[in-house]
Image (spheres, grey):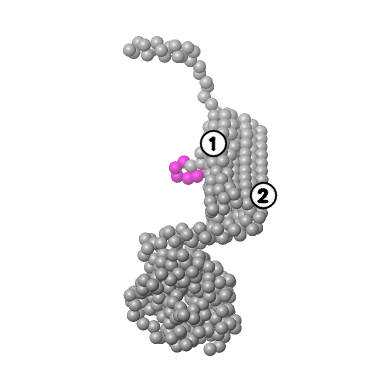
Amino acid sequence: MNKTSENNNLAVIILAAGLGKRMKSELPKVLHGVCGRTLVELVLDQVEGLGAGEVLVVVGHGSEEVSKAVGDRARCVVQSEPKGTGHAVIVALEGLDSRFDEVLVLPGDSPLIRRPTLQSLLEERRTRDAAASMLTVEMDDPAGYGRVIRDDDDGLTKIVEEADASEEERALREVNACTYAFEREALEKALGSLTADNTQGEYYLTGVVEEFVAGGQSVATVPGVSEEALGINDREQLAAAGAVVRRRINHELMLKGVTMLDPERTYVDWGVEVGRDTTIMPLVFLTGQTKIGTGCSVGPCTRISDSVIGDRCGVEFSWLDGCNVADDANVGPYSRLRPGCEIGAGCKIGSFVEIKNTVVGNGSKVPHLSYMGDAIIGEDANVGAGSITCNYDGEAKYKTEIGDRAFIGSDTMLIAPVRVGDDATTGAGSSIYEDIPDGSLGIERCEQKNVLNWREKRKKERGKSK
Protein backbone atom coordinates (compact mmCIF):
# COMPACT_ATOMS: atom_id res chain seq x y z
CA MET A 1 0.00 0.00 0.00
CA ASN A 2 1.20 3.48 -0.87
CA LYS A 3 0.31 6.61 0.94
CA THR A 4 -1.65 9.19 -0.99
CA SER A 5 0.23 12.45 -0.99
CA GLU A 6 -2.03 15.08 -2.53
CA ASN A 7 -5.74 15.70 -2.10
CA ASN A 8 -6.22 15.92 -5.86
CA ASN A 9 -5.92 12.11 -5.76
CA LEU A 10 -8.74 12.06 -3.22
CA ALA A 11 -12.32 11.25 -4.19
CA VAL A 12 -15.20 11.95 -1.84
CA ILE A 13 -18.39 9.90 -1.88
CA ILE A 14 -21.45 11.36 -0.14
CA LEU A 15 -24.22 8.83 0.51
CA ALA A 16 -27.56 10.56 -0.14
CA ALA A 17 -29.83 7.83 -1.49
CA GLY A 18 -31.77 7.06 1.70
CA LEU A 19 -35.57 6.94 1.72
CA GLY A 20 -35.97 8.76 5.02
CA LYS A 21 -39.22 7.00 5.91
CA ARG A 22 -39.28 8.38 9.45
CA MET A 23 -39.29 11.95 8.14
CA LYS A 24 -42.87 11.33 6.96
CA SER A 25 -42.28 13.62 3.98
CA GLU A 26 -42.54 13.75 0.21
CA LEU A 27 -39.26 15.67 0.23
CA PRO A 28 -36.05 13.58 -0.02
CA LYS A 29 -34.40 13.42 3.40
CA VAL A 30 -31.18 15.20 2.46
CA LEU A 31 -33.17 18.17 1.10
CA HIS A 32 -34.68 19.05 4.45
CA GLY A 33 -33.33 22.35 5.71
CA VAL A 34 -31.23 23.49 8.65
CA CYS A 35 -30.63 27.21 9.08
CA GLY A 36 -31.27 28.04 5.46
CA ARG A 37 -29.26 25.16 3.95
CA THR A 38 -30.24 21.63 2.99
CA LEU A 39 -28.55 18.75 4.78
CA VAL A 40 -26.55 17.75 1.72
CA GLU A 41 -25.45 21.36 1.13
CA LEU A 42 -24.08 21.58 4.65
CA VAL A 43 -22.07 18.40 4.08
CA LEU A 44 -20.81 19.73 0.73
CA ASP A 45 -19.74 22.97 2.43
CA GLN A 46 -17.35 21.02 4.66
CA VAL A 47 -16.13 18.66 1.95
CA GLU A 48 -15.25 21.38 -0.55
CA GLY A 49 -12.48 22.74 1.66
CA LEU A 50 -10.59 19.45 1.43
CA GLY A 51 -9.50 20.11 -2.17
CA ALA A 52 -10.62 16.68 -3.41
CA GLY A 53 -10.13 15.85 -7.06
CA GLU A 54 -13.72 14.69 -7.40
CA VAL A 55 -16.85 14.71 -5.24
CA LEU A 56 -19.65 12.24 -5.94
CA VAL A 57 -23.13 12.19 -4.43
CA VAL A 58 -24.96 8.86 -4.54
CA VAL A 59 -28.65 9.57 -5.06
CA GLY A 60 -31.68 7.30 -5.06
CA HIS A 61 -35.07 8.38 -3.76
CA GLY A 62 -35.89 11.76 -5.32
CA SER A 63 -32.74 11.59 -7.44
CA GLU A 64 -33.82 14.38 -9.80
CA GLU A 65 -34.57 16.78 -6.95
CA VAL A 66 -31.37 15.98 -5.10
CA SER A 67 -29.28 16.26 -8.27
CA LYS A 68 -30.81 19.67 -8.99
CA ALA A 69 -30.00 20.86 -5.47
CA VAL A 70 -26.41 19.60 -5.75
CA GLY A 71 -25.96 21.29 -9.13
CA ASP A 72 -22.39 21.54 -10.35
CA ARG A 73 -20.92 21.20 -6.86
CA ALA A 74 -20.56 17.43 -7.32
CA ARG A 75 -21.24 14.61 -9.77
CA CYS A 76 -24.36 12.62 -8.94
CA VAL A 77 -24.58 8.86 -9.50
CA VAL A 78 -27.82 6.92 -9.13
CA GLN A 79 -28.25 3.89 -6.88
CA SER A 80 -31.35 2.47 -8.54
CA GLU A 81 -32.02 -0.11 -5.80
CA PRO A 82 -31.58 0.59 -2.06
CA LYS A 83 -29.21 -2.28 -1.28
CA GLY A 84 -27.25 -0.60 1.50
CA THR A 85 -24.22 1.61 2.04
CA GLY A 86 -21.73 -0.93 0.69
CA HIS A 87 -23.66 -1.24 -2.55
CA ALA A 88 -23.88 2.57 -2.81
CA VAL A 89 -20.08 2.82 -2.68
CA ILE A 90 -19.76 0.09 -5.33
CA VAL A 91 -22.05 2.13 -7.61
CA ALA A 92 -20.00 5.28 -7.02
CA LEU A 93 -16.67 3.58 -7.73
CA GLU A 94 -17.78 2.09 -11.05
CA GLY A 95 -17.11 5.23 -13.07
CA LEU A 96 -14.37 6.75 -10.95
CA ASP A 97 -11.07 7.52 -12.66
CA SER A 98 -8.18 5.25 -11.67
CA ARG A 99 -6.00 8.16 -10.55
CA PHE A 100 -8.09 8.50 -7.39
CA ASP A 101 -6.33 6.18 -4.96
CA GLU A 102 -7.90 7.49 -1.74
CA VAL A 103 -11.64 7.58 -1.01
CA LEU A 104 -13.47 9.47 1.72
CA VAL A 105 -17.02 8.20 2.38
CA LEU A 106 -19.54 10.02 4.54
CA PRO A 107 -23.33 10.29 4.90
CA GLY A 108 -25.29 13.12 3.32
CA ASP A 109 -27.69 13.29 6.26
CA SER A 110 -25.07 14.16 8.91
CA PRO A 111 -24.87 17.95 8.57
CA LEU A 112 -22.79 18.60 11.70
CA ILE A 113 -19.53 17.09 10.49
CA ARG A 114 -16.66 19.60 10.36
CA ARG A 115 -13.87 19.97 7.85
CA PRO A 116 -11.05 19.66 10.46
CA THR A 117 -12.50 16.32 11.55
CA LEU A 118 -12.51 15.05 7.99
CA GLN A 119 -8.95 16.27 7.51
CA SER A 120 -7.88 14.47 10.70
CA LEU A 121 -9.46 11.27 9.41
CA LEU A 122 -7.45 11.50 6.18
CA GLU A 123 -4.21 12.39 7.93
CA GLU A 124 -4.52 9.51 10.41
CA ARG A 125 -4.96 6.98 7.62
CA ARG A 126 -2.02 8.37 5.70
CA THR A 127 0.25 8.59 8.75
CA ARG A 128 -0.42 4.99 9.72
CA ASP A 129 -0.49 3.75 6.11
CA ALA A 130 -3.75 2.07 7.07
CA ALA A 131 -6.27 0.40 4.81
CA ALA A 132 -8.91 2.63 6.42
CA SER A 133 -9.62 5.10 9.15
CA MET A 134 -13.05 5.59 10.67
CA LEU A 135 -14.69 8.17 12.89
CA THR A 136 -16.12 6.95 16.20
CA VAL A 137 -17.88 8.86 18.97
CA GLU A 138 -19.17 8.19 22.48
CA MET A 139 -22.91 8.77 22.86
CA ASP A 140 -25.06 8.89 25.97
CA ASP A 141 -27.90 7.46 23.89
CA PRO A 142 -26.44 5.31 21.10
CA ALA A 143 -29.82 4.06 19.84
CA GLY A 144 -29.90 3.68 16.09
CA TYR A 145 -26.13 3.58 15.56
CA GLY A 146 -23.77 0.71 14.82
CA ARG A 147 -21.73 -0.26 17.89
CA VAL A 148 -17.94 -0.42 17.83
CA ILE A 149 -16.69 -3.76 19.15
CA ARG A 150 -13.17 -3.94 20.55
CA ASP A 151 -10.98 -6.75 21.89
CA ASP A 152 -9.28 -6.94 25.31
CA ASP A 153 -6.39 -4.85 23.99
CA ASP A 154 -8.81 -2.10 22.88
CA GLY A 155 -8.27 -3.03 19.25
CA LEU A 156 -11.14 -2.77 16.77
CA THR A 157 -12.67 -6.12 15.86
CA LYS A 158 -15.94 -5.25 14.12
CA ILE A 159 -18.95 -2.94 13.89
CA VAL A 160 -22.39 -4.33 14.65
CA GLU A 161 -25.50 -2.62 13.31
CA GLU A 162 -28.12 -2.15 16.01
CA ALA A 163 -30.60 -4.47 14.28
CA ASP A 164 -28.03 -7.26 14.48
CA ALA A 165 -26.59 -6.45 17.92
CA SER A 166 -27.01 -8.50 21.09
CA GLU A 167 -28.25 -6.89 24.30
CA GLU A 168 -24.67 -6.73 25.58
CA GLU A 169 -23.49 -5.06 22.37
CA ARG A 170 -26.37 -2.57 22.42
CA ALA A 171 -25.23 -1.42 25.85
CA LEU A 172 -21.96 -0.13 24.38
CA ARG A 173 -21.76 3.65 23.93
CA GLU A 174 -19.00 3.93 21.33
CA VAL A 175 -20.63 4.11 17.91
CA ASN A 176 -19.65 4.24 14.29
CA ALA A 177 -20.12 7.70 12.73
CA CYS A 178 -20.34 6.14 9.23
CA THR A 179 -17.48 8.33 8.04
CA TYR A 180 -14.41 6.63 6.61
CA ALA A 181 -11.20 7.22 4.68
CA PHE A 182 -10.07 4.26 2.53
CA GLU A 183 -7.11 3.21 0.50
CA ARG A 184 -8.95 2.58 -2.76
CA GLU A 185 -7.33 -0.67 -3.83
CA ALA A 186 -8.01 -2.27 -0.46
CA LEU A 187 -11.58 -0.91 -0.48
CA GLU A 188 -12.44 -2.35 -3.89
CA LYS A 189 -11.03 -5.74 -2.97
CA ALA A 190 -13.04 -5.88 0.27
CA LEU A 191 -16.24 -4.72 -1.46
CA GLY A 192 -15.96 -7.72 -3.74
CA SER A 193 -16.36 -10.00 -0.70
CA LEU A 194 -19.40 -8.30 0.82
CA THR A 195 -22.55 -10.31 1.48
CA ALA A 196 -26.07 -9.33 2.50
CA ASP A 197 -26.24 -11.93 5.27
CA ASN A 198 -27.90 -9.74 7.91
CA THR A 199 -31.30 -8.75 9.27
CA GLN A 200 -31.81 -5.96 6.71
CA GLY A 201 -30.60 -8.00 3.74
CA GLU A 202 -28.29 -5.16 2.73
CA TYR A 203 -24.61 -4.78 1.85
CA TYR A 204 -23.18 -2.88 4.82
CA LEU A 205 -20.06 -0.80 4.37
CA THR A 206 -19.12 -1.87 7.87
CA GLY A 207 -18.47 -5.31 6.39
CA VAL A 208 -15.43 -3.81 4.66
CA VAL A 209 -13.98 -2.90 8.05
CA GLU A 210 -14.51 -6.45 9.29
CA GLU A 211 -12.79 -7.76 6.15
CA PHE A 212 -9.75 -5.58 6.84
CA VAL A 213 -9.51 -6.65 10.49
CA ALA A 214 -9.93 -10.33 9.63
CA GLY A 215 -7.20 -10.03 7.00
CA GLY A 216 -4.77 -8.35 9.35
CA GLN A 217 -4.98 -4.95 7.65
CA SER A 218 -4.79 -1.81 9.76
CA VAL A 219 -7.93 0.19 10.56
CA ALA A 220 -7.38 3.40 12.50
CA THR A 221 -10.14 4.83 14.66
CA VAL A 222 -10.37 8.59 15.11
CA PRO A 223 -12.40 9.87 18.09
CA GLY A 224 -14.82 12.68 17.33
CA VAL A 225 -17.37 14.90 19.03
CA SER A 226 -20.72 13.19 19.46
CA GLU A 227 -22.75 15.94 17.77
CA GLU A 228 -20.77 15.49 14.53
CA ALA A 229 -22.13 11.98 14.17
CA LEU A 230 -25.77 13.02 14.45
CA GLY A 231 -27.65 11.55 11.52
CA ILE A 232 -31.04 12.95 10.60
CA ASN A 233 -33.77 10.33 10.48
CA ASP A 234 -36.78 12.16 11.90
CA ARG A 235 -38.06 15.68 12.62
CA GLU A 236 -36.82 15.63 16.20
CA GLN A 237 -33.26 14.97 15.07
CA LEU A 238 -33.66 17.68 12.42
CA ALA A 239 -34.56 20.17 15.16
CA ALA A 240 -31.61 19.02 17.28
CA ALA A 241 -29.23 19.56 14.36
CA GLY A 242 -30.73 23.00 13.77
CA ALA A 243 -30.02 23.97 17.36
CA VAL A 244 -26.37 22.95 16.99
CA VAL A 245 -25.90 24.84 13.71
CA ARG A 246 -27.56 27.95 15.16
CA ARG A 247 -25.26 27.77 18.17
CA ARG A 248 -22.23 27.59 15.88
CA ILE A 249 -23.43 30.51 13.74
CA ASN A 250 -24.23 32.69 16.73
CA HIS A 251 -20.93 31.82 18.38
CA GLU A 252 -18.99 33.01 15.30
CA LEU A 253 -21.01 36.24 15.08
CA MET A 254 -20.44 37.06 18.74
CA LEU A 255 -16.70 36.45 18.32
CA LYS A 256 -16.80 39.04 15.52
CA GLY A 257 -18.35 41.71 17.75
CA VAL A 258 -22.11 41.15 17.52
CA THR A 259 -24.11 41.38 20.76
CA MET A 260 -26.90 38.84 21.28
CA LEU A 261 -29.02 39.28 24.37
CA ASP A 262 -30.32 35.71 24.17
CA PRO A 263 -28.42 33.54 21.65
CA GLU A 264 -30.67 30.54 22.27
CA ARG A 265 -33.62 32.57 20.97
CA THR A 266 -31.85 34.22 18.04
CA TYR A 267 -32.26 32.52 14.67
CA VAL A 268 -29.65 33.33 12.03
CA ASP A 269 -29.28 31.48 8.74
CA TRP A 270 -26.00 30.18 7.40
CA GLY A 271 -24.32 32.93 5.34
CA VAL A 272 -26.09 35.92 6.93
CA GLU A 273 -23.68 38.80 7.61
CA VAL A 274 -23.93 41.04 10.68
CA GLY A 275 -21.60 43.96 11.41
CA ARG A 276 -19.76 44.60 14.64
CA ASP A 277 -21.41 46.54 17.48
CA THR A 278 -24.84 45.49 16.25
CA THR A 279 -27.21 44.31 18.97
CA ILE A 280 -29.69 41.54 18.22
CA MET A 281 -32.62 41.19 20.58
CA PRO A 282 -34.47 37.91 21.29
CA LEU A 283 -36.82 36.32 18.76
CA VAL A 284 -35.05 37.76 15.73
CA PHE A 285 -35.01 35.71 12.50
CA LEU A 286 -32.32 36.65 9.95
CA THR A 287 -32.73 34.50 6.85
CA GLY A 288 -31.62 34.15 3.25
CA GLN A 289 -29.10 36.58 1.77
CA THR A 290 -29.41 39.13 4.56
CA LYS A 291 -26.69 41.62 5.48
CA ILE A 292 -26.86 43.83 8.56
CA GLY A 293 -24.49 46.78 8.97
CA THR A 294 -22.55 48.00 11.98
CA GLY A 295 -24.00 49.63 15.07
CA CYS A 296 -27.57 48.52 14.42
CA SER A 297 -30.31 47.45 16.81
CA VAL A 298 -32.47 44.61 15.55
CA GLY A 299 -35.56 43.28 17.31
CA PRO A 300 -37.10 42.03 19.39
CA CYS A 301 -39.63 39.94 17.46
CA THR A 302 -38.32 40.82 14.00
CA ARG A 303 -37.87 38.89 10.76
CA ILE A 304 -35.50 40.10 8.04
CA SER A 305 -35.18 37.99 4.89
CA ASP A 306 -33.01 38.58 1.80
CA SER A 307 -32.50 42.21 2.78
CA VAL A 308 -29.61 44.64 3.19
CA ILE A 309 -29.64 46.92 6.22
CA GLY A 310 -27.15 49.80 6.45
CA ASP A 311 -25.18 51.08 9.42
CA ARG A 312 -26.74 52.49 12.62
CA CYS A 313 -30.26 51.36 11.72
CA GLY A 314 -33.01 50.33 14.10
CA VAL A 315 -35.59 47.65 13.26
CA GLU A 316 -38.05 46.42 15.88
CA PHE A 317 -41.19 44.26 15.89
CA SER A 318 -41.19 44.22 12.07
CA TRP A 319 -40.95 42.02 8.98
CA LEU A 320 -38.68 42.94 6.07
CA ASP A 321 -38.47 40.84 2.91
CA GLY A 322 -36.31 41.62 -0.11
CA CYS A 323 -35.57 45.23 0.89
CA ASN A 324 -32.65 47.64 1.02
CA VAL A 325 -32.49 50.02 3.96
CA ALA A 326 -29.83 52.75 3.96
CA ASP A 327 -27.81 54.09 6.90
CA ASP A 328 -29.44 55.69 9.95
CA ALA A 329 -32.96 54.58 9.07
CA ASN A 330 -35.52 53.34 11.59
CA VAL A 331 -38.24 50.78 10.93
CA GLY A 332 -41.07 49.85 13.25
CA PRO A 333 -42.53 48.89 15.51
CA TYR A 334 -45.03 46.75 13.63
CA SER A 335 -43.98 47.62 10.08
CA ARG A 336 -43.97 45.35 7.07
CA LEU A 337 -41.65 46.05 4.16
CA ARG A 338 -42.39 43.81 1.19
CA PRO A 339 -40.09 43.03 -1.77
CA GLY A 340 -38.79 45.88 -3.87
CA CYS A 341 -38.53 48.53 -1.15
CA GLU A 342 -35.63 50.97 -1.15
CA ILE A 343 -35.55 52.96 2.07
CA GLY A 344 -33.22 55.98 2.03
CA ALA A 345 -30.79 57.22 4.63
CA GLY A 346 -32.30 58.71 7.77
CA CYS A 347 -35.83 57.59 6.93
CA LYS A 348 -38.48 56.78 9.49
CA ILE A 349 -40.92 53.95 8.73
CA GLY A 350 -43.15 53.90 11.76
CA SER A 351 -45.74 51.77 13.48
CA PHE A 352 -48.32 49.79 11.54
CA VAL A 353 -46.94 50.80 8.13
CA GLU A 354 -46.86 48.55 5.07
CA ILE A 355 -44.68 49.39 2.08
CA LYS A 356 -44.39 47.43 -1.16
CA ASN A 357 -42.20 48.03 -4.24
CA THR A 358 -41.58 51.61 -3.17
CA VAL A 359 -38.61 53.98 -3.10
CA VAL A 360 -38.49 56.27 -0.08
CA GLY A 361 -36.03 59.13 -0.44
CA ASN A 362 -33.48 60.23 2.13
CA GLY A 363 -34.92 61.78 5.27
CA SER A 364 -38.54 61.03 4.43
CA LYS A 365 -41.06 59.77 6.97
CA VAL A 366 -44.01 57.41 6.84
CA PRO A 367 -44.66 57.55 10.57
CA HIS A 368 -47.77 55.43 11.14
CA LEU A 369 -50.86 53.62 9.91
CA SER A 370 -50.17 53.97 6.18
CA TYR A 371 -49.81 51.86 3.05
CA MET A 372 -47.43 52.91 0.28
CA GLY A 373 -47.39 50.58 -2.73
CA ASP A 374 -45.74 51.04 -6.16
CA ALA A 375 -44.65 54.54 -5.19
CA ILE A 376 -41.69 56.85 -5.50
CA ILE A 377 -41.35 59.19 -2.53
CA GLY A 378 -38.82 62.01 -2.75
CA GLU A 379 -36.49 63.33 -0.07
CA ASP A 380 -37.64 64.92 3.21
CA ALA A 381 -41.30 64.17 2.50
CA ASN A 382 -43.84 63.40 5.21
CA VAL A 383 -46.75 60.99 4.80
CA GLY A 384 -49.49 61.58 7.36
CA ALA A 385 -51.27 58.88 9.33
CA GLY A 386 -53.81 56.73 7.55
CA SER A 387 -52.67 57.67 4.02
CA ILE A 388 -52.87 55.10 1.24
CA THR A 389 -51.73 54.74 -2.36
CA CYS A 390 -54.65 53.24 -4.26
CA ASN A 391 -52.38 51.49 -6.74
CA TYR A 392 -54.50 48.58 -8.00
CA ASP A 393 -57.72 48.71 -10.01
CA GLY A 394 -58.30 44.96 -10.05
CA GLU A 395 -56.42 44.42 -13.29
CA ALA A 396 -53.25 46.55 -13.27
CA LYS A 397 -51.04 48.41 -10.82
CA TYR A 398 -50.10 52.07 -11.19
CA LYS A 399 -47.41 54.40 -9.86
CA THR A 400 -47.74 57.18 -7.35
CA GLU A 401 -45.08 59.91 -7.21
CA ILE A 402 -44.58 62.12 -4.17
CA GLY A 403 -42.05 64.93 -4.61
CA ASP A 404 -39.29 66.25 -2.41
CA ARG A 405 -40.47 67.93 0.79
CA ALA A 406 -44.11 67.11 0.01
CA PHE A 407 -46.53 66.94 2.93
CA ILE A 408 -49.29 64.35 2.69
CA GLY A 409 -52.11 65.19 5.09
CA SER A 410 -53.58 62.46 7.26
CA ASP A 411 -56.07 60.09 5.64
CA THR A 412 -55.16 61.05 2.07
CA MET A 413 -56.15 58.59 -0.66
CA LEU A 414 -53.69 58.86 -3.56
CA ILE A 415 -55.49 57.31 -6.53
CA ALA A 416 -52.79 56.20 -8.96
CA PRO A 417 -51.48 57.09 -11.43
CA VAL A 418 -50.96 60.45 -9.78
CA ARG A 419 -48.14 62.85 -8.91
CA VAL A 420 -47.79 65.13 -5.92
CA GLY A 421 -45.17 67.75 -6.79
CA ASP A 422 -42.17 69.04 -4.87
CA ASP A 423 -43.15 71.10 -1.81
CA ALA A 424 -46.82 70.25 -2.47
CA THR A 425 -49.39 69.52 0.24
CA THR A 426 -52.58 67.48 0.40
CA GLY A 427 -55.42 68.37 2.70
CA ALA A 428 -56.29 65.81 5.33
CA GLY A 429 -59.08 63.47 4.29
CA SER A 430 -58.67 64.15 0.56
CA SER A 431 -58.98 61.72 -2.35
CA ILE A 432 -56.34 62.92 -4.79
CA TYR A 433 -56.88 61.74 -8.34
CA GLU A 434 -55.28 64.60 -10.31
CA ASP A 435 -51.65 65.74 -10.27
CA ILE A 436 -50.75 68.49 -7.80
CA PRO A 437 -48.24 71.03 -9.16
CA ASP A 438 -45.08 71.91 -7.26
CA GLY A 439 -45.69 74.04 -4.19
CA SER A 440 -49.48 73.71 -4.42
CA LEU A 441 -52.23 72.48 -2.11
CA GLY A 442 -54.48 69.67 -3.29
CA ILE A 443 -57.70 69.33 -1.35
CA GLU A 444 -60.83 67.32 -2.09
CA ARG A 445 -63.70 67.48 0.38
CA CYS A 446 -67.48 67.73 0.26
CA GLU A 447 -68.96 70.79 1.95
CA GLN A 448 -69.53 70.17 5.64
CA LYS A 449 -73.14 70.49 6.78
CA ASN A 450 -74.07 70.94 10.46
CA VAL A 451 -77.58 69.93 11.54
CA LEU A 452 -78.41 72.06 14.55
CA ASN A 453 -80.19 70.48 17.52
CA TRP A 454 -79.88 67.10 15.83
CA ARG A 455 -79.87 65.08 19.03
CA GLU A 456 -83.07 66.69 20.36
CA LYS A 457 -84.81 66.19 17.04
CA ARG A 458 -83.71 62.56 17.00
CA LYS A 459 -85.20 61.95 20.45
CA LYS A 460 -88.54 63.40 19.36
CA GLU A 461 -88.62 61.22 16.21
CA ARG A 462 -87.93 58.12 18.27
CA GLY A 463 -90.74 59.08 20.66
CA LYS A 464 -93.30 59.40 17.86
CA SER A 465 -92.34 56.01 16.44
CA LYS A 466 -93.19 54.34 19.76
The amino acid sitting under disc 2 is Gly
Please provide the residue range marked out in magenta: 393-399
Nearest the eye: 331 or 127? 127
Using the numbered discs, state the Cα–Cα distance from disc 1 to disc 2 in whole angstroms: 28 Å
Whether residue 276 is visible, yes or no, is: yes
* Residue that numbered label 2 is attached to: 295
Badge number at residue 211? none
Q: Work out whether residue 109 or residue 175 is closer to the camera in this orientation and state it.
A: 175
Q: Amino acid at mark 1?
A: Leu
Secondary structure mostly seen in the magenta stretch: loop
Closer-to-camera residue (409/175) = 175
Residue identifier under label 1: 369
**Image point (45%, 88%), residue name:** 215
**Is 29 rendered above or below residue 300?**
below
Q: Locate residue 57, reporting x and y percent.
A: 47, 73
Mark 1 surroundings: few (<14), some (14-19) or many (≥20) residues within 10 A: many
The residue located at (65%, 58%) in the rendering is 256
Q: Secondary structure at mark 1?
A: loop
Q: Is residue 398 magenta?
A: yes
> Between tags 1 and 2, which lies in front?
2
